[in-house]
Every structure is written in C-alpha cells, then in structure tokens.
Image: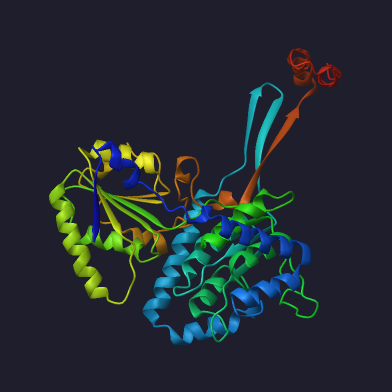
Amino acid sequence: MIERYEWSEAASRERALARPRGREDATLLAGVRTIVENVRDEGWTALVRHAELIDGATPQAIAVAPFADQARRDFPHATLDAFALAVRNIDAFHRATRPADVETEPMPGLRVAKRWTPIASAGLYVPGGAAPLFSTLLMLGLPARVAGVDRLVVVTPPRKGGGLNLAIALAAEAVGVEQVWAVGGAQAIAALAFGAKSPTAKSLTGSDIPAVARICGPGNAWVAAAKALVSSLPGGPAIDLPAGPSELMVIADASADPATVAADLLSQAEHDPQAQVLLVTPDPALIDAVERAVAAQIAAIGNRIFAPVRAIRCASLDEAATIANTYAPEHLSLATDASEQLLLLCKNAGAIFVGHSVAESFGDYLAGSSHVLPTDGAALAVGGVSTLTFMKETSVQRASPAAARALAAPAAALARLEGLEAHARAAELRA
C-alpha cells in the first residue's frame, strides 16, 4: 500500500521523487497539435468535429441562472453557507493582496512608476468528469474579478444528459459569469486561444467563443499540452502555469497523528491515479502507523481508486526540508510540532500548510488563496494563481527639464558603450 524509500540510498532518490511523464508521449502531443491546428484554421467546424468525437456533444453555451436557482433550492442550507464562506474568504484574500501602483523618485525630477492594469479577457477551464471541480471556478474567477478583468469565458466538459452541474452554476454566478460553454479538452483550449464563431448559434453575449488574452485552469494531459502549445504560437494567449497531476508532500515526525497524516495523503491520492503523494519523515514507526491508517481509511471510503503513497525515510527534519526544496511540491504540509521553524527552511512549494490543525483541504476550498498551483517542480520558479495572474505591469517614466539635462550625457555615454549612436543622439537632444 505504501512504497518505501531510503533517502540515504542514492540509487533510490530518483525513483522516490519521480514524476509521471505521460505528457511527453509523442502520440498525445501529435494529437493535441492536430486538434489545435484544426481549430485555428477551420474555426467552429473543426471545434464541432473534435467535440462530437471526443466529448460526444456539440459545444453549447448554457445559461447559468436557471441552474444556480435550482442549486439554491436543492442544496442544504449548510452547503450554501459553506459556499458563501468560501466566496467571502477567497474574495477577501485577493482584495488584500492585489498589487498597488507605486511611484519612486530615484533622483530629483525623475519619477518612475509601476502601474498595474487588468488584462481584457481570460478563459477559465473548469475540469469536469467524475468530480466537476466547481472550486476551481471560484479559485480562478474571484481573483480575476478582483483584478478587474472585464470578460471571463468559462469552458467545462459537457455532462451526460446536458445541462450544467449545479455547483459549477453557483460558482459561475458568484464570479459574475452568465453562461458557461459545455466543451472540454484540447479543443476547448484551442477555441479560447483563437476564437470560434458559430454560423448559427448565438450565446448570451451576442457572440460565440471569443479569443482571450490568458487561459487559466488545470486539466488532463491533453489540456496541459494544448495550453503549452497555444501559448508558444505567434499571437497565442498567455497561460497561468504548468498544471499536472495533483501533488502533496507531508513532512511529519513522531508528534503527528498517523490517521490525520493518512487522511491528508488520501485527500490528494483520490484526485487521479497519477497524483503524487509523498510522506517524508525521520520516524520509521510513523511510516508503519500511516500505512495501517491508509489501509483502514481506503477500506472505509470504499469504491475509489487512489494513487499510491510513497514514504521517504530521511535522517532529520532539516533533511526533509532539503527534500521538499528539491522536489518543489504543489502542496507541502508540515505535520510537526516544529512546523514554524521548519517553514523557514522550506522555500519551494506552491502552498504550505503549517502545523497539525490546518488541512490541505482547507486550501482546496475556502482558506482564501487560490488552489491553482504549480506542479511538476515549477514551484522552483513560479507561484500559484493570484490577482497578478490577471494583471500586467507597465512602467511609466517622467522627467523634469532639469532632470532630463542631468540624464542626457550619462545616457549617451552608456549608449555609445553599446555602439548605439542613434540612442545617444536621442538622449543628447534633451540636454
């Protein structure tokens, strides 16, 4: 049930931290390229062809309001209250962390500012399948609205029998989206990248799937590959970040409760058979106890497929932090009484959960920060989705006549150092 590794054995380290490589499959990449190029070149016709083949349904714009109304009628009050709490917390966090314009004066008369402006549009991909992730729509749509994005285009795989998942409808309403497009996979990403206009159908906004400035949201290997491809094409959209299978690393010691550690590990292992779920500990007895707890909890949950759990035994909590920084997990849980001290050592993770009381599930739904986080080691260099994802920074320079005169000669000297005479003359004209 648990795969065991010893960090002291160099030969096992690579296996212990290995990630799935399915998205490098040549057949998958070729298939994604075909879909993307077809939709780019043929528009709606190709989108329909691929959607009917893969999704089994024609792309359709679905009005949110009737399904959101039904959700309010059908969901228990406790569920609606929990939903409202999540919206409040996510909105509050992103309002508090939205970047502000700043201006400095490096020298008298020279003012240099940074101005933040929202992007005009964003496409939000909401995974469907067995567990439609309405929470992803909140985690993307709320920071986008706080950032000030005018147009959000939401796509999600179609449901058998049509309609819209009630929780997704409620989330769409919460982020101010009036319609959701029922289309998924690489074809949905291509439509968001290039636009797809139906010759007959009209959406609620009077247009069809428009091209967007940035595409955000996790998905399967086809979605991830399509996002990477469209973002690399001339004029293609930006994307949020690499989003592969879910990852959770738990660093724990003898102070941790084995049942709680097991529950946290399984909370990510149930996402996907390829989910990356790792326990790192200096305590071999804890590994044994967690293994028993994992088996008991899987038996209690019943008919569910879980990714395997890997346990890495290390020499100390300091070494565990080194392992975490090497792996750079999407989620990192510090289940130890020394969690605050350990936090200071942990630099590379999409989100860190400090101490025994905070569940990774809190971050998935209602702690406030987005759960759309870097995977596959991307946390070495990037963070998760935030208002900054939906904004762009522009520098603004102003100079008084006196400052311009003071800057002209130095600027010209530096330009000539690079052999750029026209640059130098442009500077000298301000003297």
Instruction: Pinpoint residue 98: horizontal percent, then vertical percent.
Output: 55, 49
Is residue 254 toward the left or the right of residue 222 in the image? left
The residue nearer to you, when weighing 163 against 84, is 163
Is 286 rendered above or below residue 141? above
Is residue 402 toward the left or the right of residue 91 in the image? right
Instruction: Pinpoint residue 167: horizontal percent, then vertical percent.
Output: 48, 76
The residue nearer to you, when weighing 375 against 413, is 375
Is 303 rendered above or below residue 99? below
Figure disc tally: 0
- Whether residue 208 is visible, yes or no, is no
Is residue 94 toward the left or the right of residue 305 in the image? right
Q: Quadrant of residue 275?
A: bottom left
Instruction: Pinpoint residue 415: horizontal percent, then vertical percent.
Output: 76, 17
Is 351 rendered above or below residue 129? above
Instruction: Pinpoint residue 97: horizontal percent, then vertical percent.
Output: 50, 49
Instruction: Report the coloring of the rendering.
Output: rainbow
Is residue 428 toward the left or the right of residue 117 in the image? right
- Whether residue 86 is visible, yes or no, is yes
Specify the farthest residue to the front.
27
- Seen at 59% across and 60% down, the residue is 145
Q: Quadrant of residue 320?
A: top left
Is 23 rendered above or below residue 407? below
- Seen at 22% across and 73% down, the residue is 299
- Seen at 52% across and 71% down, the residue is 171
User: Image quadrant for the N terminus?
Assistant: bottom left
User: Image quadrant for the C terminus?
Assistant: top right
- Seen at 61% across and 64% down, the residue is 186
The residue nearer to you, when weighing 369 against 420, is 420
